[in-house]
Amino acid sequence: MQTPPTGTSRRQVLAAAAAVAAAPLVGAAPAYADSSKTKSWDLTLLGTSDLHGNVYNWDYYKDKEYDDSAHNDVGVAKLATLVNQIRAERRGKATLVLDAGDTIQGTPLATFYAKQEPITTTGETHPMARSMNIIDYDAVTLGNHEFNYGLPLLDLWIRQLGFPALAANAVDAATGQPAFLPYVIKKVDLGKGAPTLRVGILGLTNPGVAIWDRGNVEGKLVFKDMVATALKWVPIMRARGADIVLVSAHGGDSGTSSYGPELPNENPAALIAQQVPGIDAILFGHAHNEVVQRFVTNDISGEQVLLSEPSKWGQRLTRMDFTLSRDQGEWRITSKQSTMLNTNTVVEDPAVLAAVRAQHNKTVAYVNQVVARSVVELSAAESRYKDTAILDYINKVQTDTVATALASTQYATLPVLSIAAPFSRTAVFPAGDVKIKDVAGLYIYDNTLEAVLISGAEVRAYLEYSAKYFRTLAVGAAVDPETINESTVPDYNYDTLSGVDYDIDISKPVGQRITKLTHGGTDTPVADGDQFVIAVNNYRRSGGGNFPGVVKTQVYNEQQEIRQLLIDWAQAKGAIDPADFFTPNWRLVREGVPVF
């Protein structure tokens, strides 16, 4: 973990210096006469975000080339081809490349080099460092998922990069100083005899890390408000010579948070543009949206700030184009716009493929290992609105793990409940051989298992909160499974519970939908004072999704990864049979009549 004096570590200063040195320089800026006022130059910024461990255009869960209904492609190799094309087109002109974070988590490839063969043990270069170094980014911002695997792995990954990693609002808990490089100022040659342009790049990460990865950062890092941090650093960057300021922010633009008011805003990109003067453009990420071009008027300066978000996984590349002029020795942006490029229009860059080929092949071999045989096909396609065996499989494994661990404790007599969310709509355990990729496709996150005490009143409140996932549909109204949920609530924030029986009445208002709640396999209602243990993942227990009743001290936390527990259970059994775990215990109703 870096604890840099005066805000930067020697390594980070060297990395920043190397990044500056890598940019073509024109030497000392010549003195220009008044004729320079009529000249204009241009700068292009290329932006990526939320790459989530995608290098090859490959779906490791399906073991074939990635494809979706819109025929998107993914991966750094595709992005590299677009970047190379634009650099070639602009040869002799300035082109910068930035990333807005969430880079080292999200695919079996990334997981393999964090968990199965962690780079902290082997010393191997991370595949995302290998691939991004070939593109030769100018800077990357740390996203919240960068912290998933702990600070030692993050620190090593940063050291493997050939360019700076930024996070101005992540500060050392002991010293209050920036724990990572806050910003970099790059000297950029615009060509055509232009004076040197000094481009300031500020990186802002997501405050939600304090909740989502509390186990990795608590007592070590503090995550400050992104708006307040920009208000602090932008004037400093300007004072230190930045002619223009670009922000790379890992936070969406909606101004809302998935958690409560205990932390700074999760998605403040538009607020930064509105409230912080001196910013010219913001590349942002985190929400996985495609925002081609958005202008926000700054309340103080009246300037128009350009914003863009390039979707996810390397499916899109933001291109921002700036026209600049120079007046009285000062740079001014005279026009700016952004467009979006689709990576499905190009082939993969062979240099990137070659750099990561061995790691890709090793990951493919790993995920194709057989863990068990399933007696029937199990699908997650209906798990959002029907009780399915494949989610009960998750709950069975979690319940058994926690119950076994608590068997000799004071909690041994308490019923164990469990939560599972429909992370994937396409996950399938095929009849016959079930491979690691099938389990990974069901449980796509690197969560660990925890458990807390929960009362009957808290169980009801938890279920009511989860049930806001569904739209209100009156008795007799048509029900379309594709539109049954509220679009504002992601699937991963809808939980089903095992260990209690309940009905969700989707004809009733949010907060009044749990019309039946019993336990013990009987008609005995769950009383407010009843006590249970509930198995949850670390994301949920730490406050992810802002669910009530579970942000409390654990009674179980052995740092066991849930995906690995699912694999281990299947390997021990040798067979995956719904008879061993499927217990239908919840349903959607309207006035007591089942919806399905």
Image (cartoon, rainbow, N blue to C red):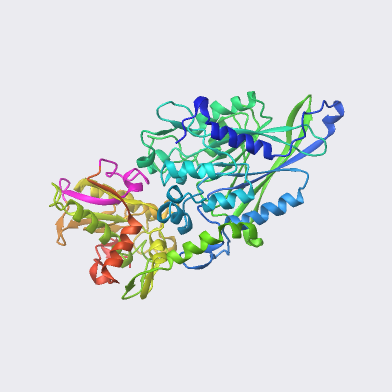
Eyeballing the image, is 191 above or below 108? above
Q: Where residue 74 sits: x, y (%)? A: 56, 59
Task: Quadrant for the N terminus, please.
Answer: top left
Q: Where residue 157 sits: x, y (%)? A: 50, 45
Q: Which residue is at 53% across, 41% downward?
A: 159
Residue 582 or 473: which is nearer the viewer?
Answer: 582
Q: Quadrant of residue 398?
A: bottom left
Task: Quadrant for the C terminus, please.
Answer: bottom left
Decide if residue 495 is on the left or right side of residue 296.
left
Residue 245 or 335: which is nearer the viewer?
Answer: 245
Residue 31 or 588: which is nearer the viewer?
Answer: 31
- Is residue 172 among the parts visible in the rendering? yes
Decide if residue 280 is on the left or right side of residue 388.
right
Q: Which residue is at 17% across, 46% downward?
A: 528
Specify start and end residues of the magenta stretch as a single range.
Answer: 527-553
Q: Where residue 417 sits: x, y (%)? A: 23, 54
**Membership of 531 in magenta stretch:** yes
**Membership of 32 in magenta stretch:** no
Q: Where residue 82 sits: x, y (%)? A: 67, 55
- Is residue 349 among the parts visible in the rendering? no
Q: Residue furthest front?
A: 122
Decide if residue 127 is on the left or right side of residue 425.
right
Eyeballing the image, is 98 above or below 9? below
Eyeballing the image, is 316 above or below 482? above
Total labels drawn: 0
